[in-house]
Every structure is written in C-alpha cells, then in structure tokens.
Image (spheres, grey):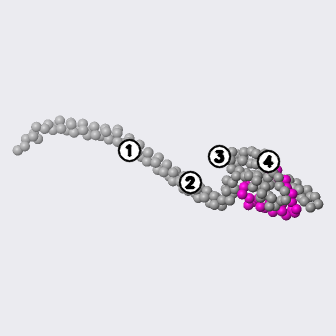
C-alpha cells in the first residue's frame, strides 16, 4: 500500500489551497475585471465610431456621385475654364460676325484665388444689328467663358454700325 498520502498534512494543504485561491481571486478581481471594463468601454467607443464612419462613407459616396453627375452635366463649362484664352483666337471668332474687331485689355484681376478675370474693351464695325445679336448668342458656345457687359454703345453711320462694349473672360487660376 501507498503511504505517501499519510505524510501530507491536511491543514497545511488547506492553507496552501486557500492562499492559492486568494491569490487567484486577487488576480481576477484586480487585473482581469478592470481589463474587461476597459474592453467594454472600448467596444462601445468602437461601435460609435464605426457607425459614424459608415455614415461618413455613405455621405462620401453620395457626394462622389453628385460630383460625377455635375461633371457630366457641366462638361462644356469645365472644358471652357480649362481652355486658355488668347486674343488672337477671340479676334478670329469675332471676325466671323464683325467687319473689324479690336481688343484692348482694361483690367486683369484674381477672382477668389481660383479664377482670373480679364476685362477687355471690344470695338467693332458691323453692317446689321442682327450680326451683333448672333455674336452675343454665339458667346455661349465659345471655347472660353466670356461675358458681355453693358453698356453697349452703338453708333450708326450711313452703312456701318460702330459698336463698343466690355467683355469679361474667366480663366482658371491654377498653376499649369
């Protein structure tokens, strides 16, 4: 028979067992429980941030779609802003409507740091006022963004109408 169990003191064994249980309980209460509390609060913050992230992502998707829609709707206007304005091209274009055209630069200024605005004085000669109105209508299809400003002065001689007016040309103010 095995007598090794007889040598074990049961009181010492219970004391060691009690000390082991107390140390284990102490470790659980002071090390693991606060970690669980931190984990729960971290999970709450994570879920809140996840909801915010998902809402921001959906808003971003909506804005991207809106941007793409605006780009397709305003493709011509965007291309007009990207096109560099030259007086030579404008005089050639205006020459299709007028007999004689001259441009004088009045002012050049920045517009909200995104655009440059050229203000030009146009003097022209034409034979009929309908050509002038055709020119104004044709500015909508011109390769740049051009705005004709009032007042428009027109003086008529016997066969030629002299006109002078101011136009504003808007150009993208980006470093190219």
Is 62 in the magenta?
no
Q: Which comes before the other along the chain, label 2 or label 3?
A: 2
- Residues at marks 4 and 2, CA–CA distance in whole angstroms: 43 Å
Work out which residue is located at the far right of the displayed protein and give it. 158
Mark 1 element type: helix
How many numbered marks appear? 4
- Residues at marks 2 and 3, CA–CA distance in whole angstroms: 27 Å
Mark 2 element type: helix
Asked whether, in this view, residue 120 is left or right of residue 18, the answer is right
Q: Which residues are magenta?
A: 120-146
User: Can you tell which of label 4 and label 1 is closer to the viewer?
Assistant: 4
- Residues at marks 1 and 2, CA–CA distance in whole angstroms: 35 Å
**Residue in view at x 77 percent, y 57 percent:** 92
- Residues at marks 3 and 4, CA–CA distance in whole angstroms: 22 Å
- Of 157 and 38, the residue lying toward us: 157
Q: Is residue 175 above or below residue 63?
A: above
Q: Position of residue 78 (x, y in %)?
A: 67, 56
Disc 2: which residue:
60
**Residue in view at x 67 percent, y 53 percent:** 82
**Residue in view at x 73 percent, y 61 percent:** 141
- In the rendered structure, are the residues bearing label 4 and label 2 in contact, judged by CB atoms less than 8 Å apart? no
In the picture, the disc for residue 105 is 4
In the picture, the disc for residue 175 is 3
Q: Is residue 150 visible?
A: no
Q: Which comes before the other along the chain, label 4 or label 2?
A: 2
- Of 25 and 11, the residue lying toward us: 25
Disc 1: which residue:
36
Q: Residues within 10 Å of mark 4 (few under 14, many from 20)?
A: some
- Residues at marks 4 and 1, CA–CA distance in whole angstroms: 74 Å
Quarter that holds the N terminus:
top left
Q: Which comes before the other along the chain, label 3 or label 4?
A: 4
């Amino acid at each position: 028979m095995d007598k090794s169990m007889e040598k074990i003191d049961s009181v010492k064994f219970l004391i060691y067992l009690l000390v082991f249980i107390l140390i284990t309980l102490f470790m659980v209460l002071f090390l693991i429980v606060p970690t669980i509390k931190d984990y729960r609060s971290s999970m709450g913050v994570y879920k809140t941030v996840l909801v915010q992230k998902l809402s921001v992502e959906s808003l971003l998707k909506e804005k991207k779609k809106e941007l793409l829609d605006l780009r397709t709707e305003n493709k011509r206007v965007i291309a007009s802003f990207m096109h560099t304005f030259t007086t030579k091209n404008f005089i050639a274009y205006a020459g299709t409507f007028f007999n004689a055209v001259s441009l004088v630069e009045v002012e050049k200024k920045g517009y909200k740091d995104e655009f440059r605005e050229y203000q030009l004085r146009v003097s022209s000669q034409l034979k009929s006022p309908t050509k002038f109105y055709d020119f104004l209508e044709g500015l909508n299809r011109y390769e740049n963004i051009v705005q004709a400003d009032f007042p428009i002065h027109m003086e008529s001689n016997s066969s030629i109408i002299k006109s002078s007016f101011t136009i504003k040309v808007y150009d993208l103010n980006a470093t190219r």
